[in-house]
């Protein structure tokens, strides 16, 4: 048993009493999210918290980290003074495996090239009581769903798709490594009390429609910002009819609408999945308190009274969707997609189709896709696109191999990739004749920002269900609608694909030979964690300097970023992933993907010291060498995307003092605060236009830095004029302490030393 049954027993023993106390405190019926949130307060509440306003301290039950983010999180944890993690925690080696030829070879290559990182993660996990999932064991969120997620629990994970565990009724939230350090250190974890969006699912899915289409539709409605600061709670008979893994897919991709997390209410489908994955005892415990794991009956009766926003989707009418390109909220029902492809001049030829990933590699997904692959064989169809399959875990891979499904994919030319992130995170050595040629790919993954999958700007990436991806792979054509269109087979006949069919769970049960788990040492005090000083991939951390106690004056404008600036633009993934444990080296990718508003170029900014244009990191290093701080200015939803705190640590390390934007994505804003940075927003968004290329910037009012109190920024222009503008912030008292101490870790260390 890899999960901590005693911890779950404790949570369930306390839950009914805590829910009752919350109902009394709020004086009304409760949603599921409220039950879980209030049951996980660090200290009992004396007054209700205001959604969207109050900062609240929580005590999550678990922490999960993937290998790219775990390096920095654990390097930080090492310095906080504890000998063991305070809550059950795990590390998952999934992000560093590059997809090139196929699972076995790619895994072997990764074991070789990432040896020192894996050894570091394995030994530090062993030392501090952390469960370690080896390379090849699977993708973090799938492994968590199979082993650790439990209804009514709360976890954080250092990856933005952590909410996947909401498929099993858990509040699972993506955070930066610094938050993981807090929780592993036994400290409170802080979050602004989320608002609640209720999604009522009526009807029942059939035919080509799958769970993925629910979230693709929701993304179209809410857009990439619509869920910011919100928990999305799904309920209704449509929800109850959906498999637990389908629910997981929906919660996973809630990250694409910026949601804090998403959650489904406990039902028989969750119980079935718990039992199928060796957790009958957990299912029995959940059944015993199931009323506490669902919203109160009054909430179902009148949802608009209890949620801040309610969306209703009739699954019986829901069409399959294809979203993209370049953003996951550009939602097209399949009946309208072909026309959109033609009108927008997107490349019609589909070059690569990729199924699987943490989002969509359940037994149900694979069997439904395999049913289409089987039709391609039986109906003599030639599969026109390259086709890859990424199993989410070794448990899934072993089981689908045993059941002959991988063999079916093999027969249509499918390539099975390692149980890892691979092309989903840009870890893909794609074979393409001309990397600048406009081309189309489609995935059943979750993100499709430019360059996300293969690093190529000319690639148009679309997202759909595994069934639609497989059907389009067979057609090799984006304008193919499998619900209505025919295909010509090798015999010259016109044939149609039948609706996909599959199984939620394997009839013979799941099976695995070696799941790839390493339990930690009972006493880790003798375990050595070695980081070579010569390493270019790992670097022990030195604390950041505290605030100097004065206003910040004479800061140079480093870049005024225009338009979308995601964490991929700020700290690009792909080839840079290998430096995730080395702050100085990875800082050489800082903001290289951001578009400079003054010349519309990426990675080209004016160095105010010599007037020359150069790469962003080099320019910032020049300011740092000269002892001058700088400011980064950005547009709306700055820092959307992944939870990586490198996007906050790099500017901090290189001497950027403030990020001033029209609006922030939540995780990134928190990460900036944790690192002791100033995260500021324009009080008047029009003031963004006042920022000029040669501006020297003062930040005034820091000695009176207080919650809710705006600061002043003075833009000193080159022509001698200046603009004084008001900027807002969302710092509370504690976060202001972080700023003053030079970062949250500095505060933690002083608490352990005291
Ligand atoms: Fe990995 Fe992609 Fe999921 S990067 S964790 S497979 S979103």
Image: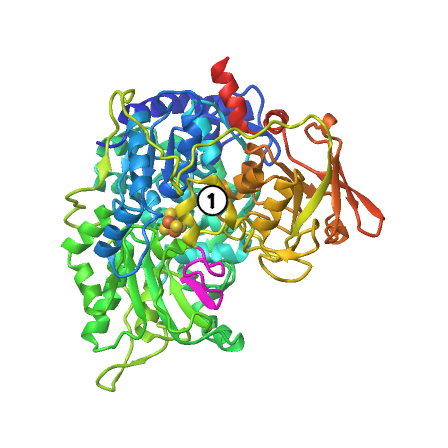
Residue drawn at 46 percent across, 42 percent down = 261
Q: Is residue 148 visible?
A: no
Q: Secondary structure at mark 1?
A: helix
> Would residue 289 appear left or right of 671 to someone viewing this image?
left
- Does 450 lie within the magenta span? yes
x, y percentage for residue 360?
34, 54
Q: Is residue 103 visible?
A: yes
Cβ of mark 1 under 8 Å from ligand 1: the answer is no
**In front: 417, or 741?**
741
Up the image or down, 444 lies above or below 522; here it is below
**In front: 150, or 650?**
650
> Would residue 650 appear left or right of 540 to someone viewing this image?
right
Residue drawn at 49 percent across, 58 percent down = 449
Residue drawn at 15 percent across, 59 percent down = 404
**In front: 626, or 660?**
626
Residue 294 falls in image quadrant: top left
> Would residue 298 appear left or right of 725 to someone viewing this image?
left
Q: Which residues are magenta?
A: 447-463
x, y percentage for residue 414?
25, 65
Name of the residue lying farthest toward the bottom: 492
């Amino acid at each position: 048993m890899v999960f901590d049954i005693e911890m779950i027993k404790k949570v369930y023993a306390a839950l009914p009493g805590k829910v009752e106390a919350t109902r009394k405190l709020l004086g009304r019926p409760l949603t599921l999210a409220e039950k879980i949130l209030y049951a996980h307060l660090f200290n009992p509440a004396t007054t209700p918290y205001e959604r969207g306003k109050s900062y609240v301290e929580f005590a999550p039950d678990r922490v999960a980290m993937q290998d790219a983010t775990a390096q920095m999180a654990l390097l930080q944890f090492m310095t906080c003074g504890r000998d063991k993690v305070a809550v059950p925690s795990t590390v998952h080696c999934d992000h560093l495996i590059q997809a090139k030829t196929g699972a076995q070879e790619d895994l072997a290559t990764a074991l070789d090239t990432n040896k020192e990182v894996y050894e570091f993660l394995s030994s530090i996990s062993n030392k501090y009581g952390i469960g370690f999932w080896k390379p090849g064991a699977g993708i973090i969120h799938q492994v968590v769903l199979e082993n650790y997620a439990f209804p009514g629990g709360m976890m954080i994970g250092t990856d933005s798709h952590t909410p996947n565990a909401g498929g099993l009724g858990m509040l699972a939230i993506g955070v930066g490594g610094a938050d993981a350090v807090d929780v592993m250190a036994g400290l409170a974890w802080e979050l602004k009390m989320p608002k609640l969006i209720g999604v009522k699912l009526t009807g029942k899915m059939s035919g080509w429609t799958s769970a993925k289409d629910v979230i693709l539709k929701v993304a179209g409605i809410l857009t990439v910002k619509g869920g910011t600061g919100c928990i999305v709670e799904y309920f209704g008979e449509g929800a109850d009819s959906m498999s637990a893994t389908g629910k997981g897919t929906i919660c996973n991709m809630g990250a694409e609408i910026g949601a804090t997390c998403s959650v489904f209410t406990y039902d028989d489908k969750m119980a079935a999945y718990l039992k199928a994955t060796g957790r009958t005892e957990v299912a029995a415990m959940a059944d015993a308190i199931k009323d506490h794991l669902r919203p109160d009956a009054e909430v179902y009766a009148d949802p608009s009274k209890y949620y801040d926003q309610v969306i209703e989707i009739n699954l019986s009418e829901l069409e399959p969707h294809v979203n993209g390109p370049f953003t996951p909220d550009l939602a097209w029902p399949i009946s309208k997609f072909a026309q959109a492809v033609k009108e927008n001049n997107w490349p019609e030829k589909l070059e690569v189709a990729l199924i699987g990933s943490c989002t969509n590699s359940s037994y149900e997904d694979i069997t439904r896709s395999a049913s289409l692959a089987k039709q391609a064989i039986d109906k003599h169809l030639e599969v026109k696109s390259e086709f890859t399959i990424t199993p989410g875990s070794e448990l899934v891979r072993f089981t689908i191999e045993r059941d002959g499904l991988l063999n079916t994919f093999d027969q249509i030319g499918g390539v099975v990739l390692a149980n890892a992130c691979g092309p989903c995170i840009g870890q893909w050595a794609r074979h393409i004749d001309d990397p600048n040629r406009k081309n189309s790919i489609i995935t059943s993954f979750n993100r499709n920002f430019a360059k996300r999958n293969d690093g190529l700007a000319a690639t148009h990436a679309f997202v759909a269900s595994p069934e639609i991806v497989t059907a389009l792979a067979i057609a090799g054509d984006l304008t193919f609608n499998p619900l209505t269109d025919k295909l010509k087979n090798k015999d010259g006949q016109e044939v149609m694909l039948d609706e996909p069919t599959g199984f939620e769970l394997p009839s013979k049960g799941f099976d695995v030979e070696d799941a790839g788990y390493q339990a930690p040492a009972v006493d880790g005090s003798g375990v050595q964690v070695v980081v070579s000083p010569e390493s270019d991939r790992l670097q022990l951390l030195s604390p950041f300097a505290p605030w100097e106690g004065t206003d910040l004056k004479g800061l140079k404008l480093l870049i005024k970023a225009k338009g979308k600036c995601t964490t991929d633009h700020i700290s690009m993934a792909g080839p840079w992933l290998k430096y995730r444990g080395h702050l100085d080296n990875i800082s050489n990718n800082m903001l290289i993907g951001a578009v400079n508003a003054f010349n519309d170029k990426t990675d080209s900014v004016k160095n105010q010291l010599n007037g020359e244009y150069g790469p962003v990191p080099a320019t910032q290093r020049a300011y740092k060498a000269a002892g001058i701080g700088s400011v980064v200015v950005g547009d709306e939803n700055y820092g959307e995307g992944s939870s990586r705190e490198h996007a906050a640590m790099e500017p901090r390390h290189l001497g950027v003092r403030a990020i001033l934007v029209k609006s922030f994505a939540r995780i990134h804003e928190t990460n900036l605060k944790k690192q002791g940075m100033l995260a500021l927003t324009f009080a008047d968004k029009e003031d963004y236009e006042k920022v000029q290329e040669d501006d020297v910037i003062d930040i005034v009012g820091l000695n009176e830095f207080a919650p809710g109190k705006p600061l002043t920024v003075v833009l000193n222009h080159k022509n001698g004029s200046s603009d004084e503008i008001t900027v807002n912030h969302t710092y509370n008292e504690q976060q202001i302490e972080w700023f003053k101490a030079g970062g949250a870790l500095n505060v933690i260390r002083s608490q352990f030393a005291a």
